[in-house]
Image: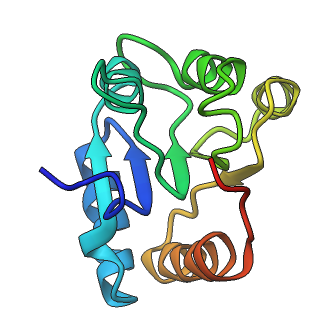
Amino acid sequence: MKTKEAVEILLVEDNPRDVELTLHAFKKHNLANSIEVVRDGEEALDYLFRVDAVHVPRVVLLDLKLPKVDGLEVLRRLKADPRTRPIPVVMLTSSSQERDIVDSYQLGVNSYIVKPVEFERFTEVARELQLYWLLLNQPPTV
């Protein structure tokens, strides 16, 4: 298991194809080793709020439509807890519905990105996410 210091990105994604694409895109940019993948909202909350410690990735990439606990509820719980509130959350989803965008921002999402369908564009989005959230953004010490 990775230590909490080693995890820069928590990817919360239930679609195996999207997980594979995301990992491939990050691997292309030398980031694959610092990603923890969880497959549903319940697993994400369990990971972040383990009994022994709160795990603090540098950024959470969160899908909206998830089994067990949906992305909006995961976001709501992250932003409600003072220990995890500062963690940047990027909604990375296929939904471009205005209601989903509005709800996400009202709950405190830091960014909302609609997943590109084409692999090359998706790879470019992954590179930009890495550049901004891991290199340029200066988060507070949690």
56 sits to left or right of 39: right
Residue that extends furthest to the top in the rendered view of this protein: 68
The image shows residue 136, relative to residue 103, as above or below, that is below
22 sits to left or right of 36: right
Q: Which residue does the image show at 73% across and 56% down from the upper left?
A: 140
Labels in figure, total: 0
Q: Which residue does the image show at 63% across and 45% down from the upper left?
A: 87
* In-front residue for pair 27/120: 27
85 sits to left or right of 63: right
x, y (%) of residue 25? 38, 77
Q: Which residue does the image show at 43% across and 24% down from the upper left?
A: 66
What's the coloring here?
rainbow
* In-front residue for pair 47/141: 141
Q: Which residue does the image show at 62% across and 47% down from the upper left?
A: 142
x, y (%) of residue 122? 51, 72
The image shows residue 19, relative to residue 22, as above or below, that is above
121 sits to left or right of 106: left
x, y (%) of residue 137? 74, 72
Residue that extends furthest to the left in the rendered view of this protein: 1
The image shows residue 73, relative to residue 138, as above or below, that is above
